[in-house]
Image (cartoon, helix red, strand yellow):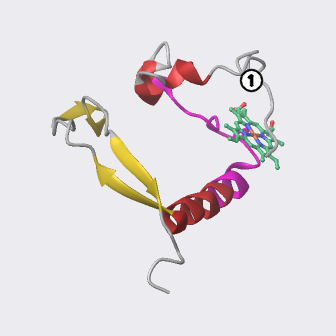
Amino acid sequence: MFLHDVGGLLVEFKPERFANGLSGACKYPQAYLPFGYGSRHCLGQNFTLTEIKIVLGLLVNNFEFKLSPNYVHCPASNFLLVPKYGVKLLVSKVDHNKGK
Ligand code: HEM
């Protein structure tokens, strides 16, 4: 996937910046616009979202997702309704050969 640097933030591989969710990674959570906005918004947005859907399809096909018993249901309003404490999932690989 082609990624380009916006404001020097992408140079460093730092996934822990999302440890507190997407909004936690932003100085101003309501300003989270990953593809920009307006007439100069990202040209690759539709391509990228299609790519993400393909990856999501592969994940759903190959893994089973269960809600963790530690999940606390607490919808919170943050412009959109979001799970206040995140959604912890238990992920396990699907064995496609099982039962054959
Ligand atoms: C996760 C993937 C991507 C993210 C988060 C992203 C994000 C962005 C952002 C924030 C901008 C600046 C928008 C603005 O100035 O308001 C931008 C511009 C742009 N992006 Fe992306 N981008 C992604 C993938 C791609 C891909 C895959 C392509 C091409 C195949 C692409 C092509 C472009 C181009 C050409 C611009 C400049 C548009 C202009 O100035 O008119 N981007 N992108």
83 left or right of 60 in image: left
Magenta span covers which residues? 30-50
Q: Nearer the viewer, residue 74 or 98?
A: 98
List x then y, in percent, for residue 76.
20, 32
The residue sitting at 54% across, 65% down in the picture is: 62
Residue 30 vertical position relative to residue 86 in the rendered view, above or below: above
- Secondary element under disc 1, as helix, strand or loop, is loop
List x then y, in percent, for residue 57.
55, 65
The residue sitting at 50% across, 24% down in the picture is: 18
Q: Nearer the viewer, residue 51 or 61?
A: 61
The residue sitting at 62% across, 54% down in the picture is: 52
Question: What residue type is disc 1 on?
Answer: Val
- Magenta span contains residue 40: yes
76 left or right of 22 in image: left
> In terms of secondary structure, what is the magenta stretch mainly?
loop
Q: Nearer the viewer, residue 94 or 50?
A: 94
Task: Identify residue for label 1.
Answer: 6
32 left or right of 75 in image: right
1 left or right of 16 in image: right
Q: Is mark 1 within 8 Å of ligand 1?
A: yes
- Magenta span contains residue 86: no
Label 1 Cα neighbours within 10 Å, binned few <14 / some 14-19 / many ≥20: few
Number of callouts? 1
The residue at the far left in this view is 73
List x then y, in percent, for residue 22.
46, 29
Where on the image, by quarter, is ligand 1? top right
Residue 12 vertical position relative to residue 53 in the rendered view, above or below: above
Q: Quadrant of residue 55?
A: bottom right
Q: Quadrant of residue 88?
A: top left
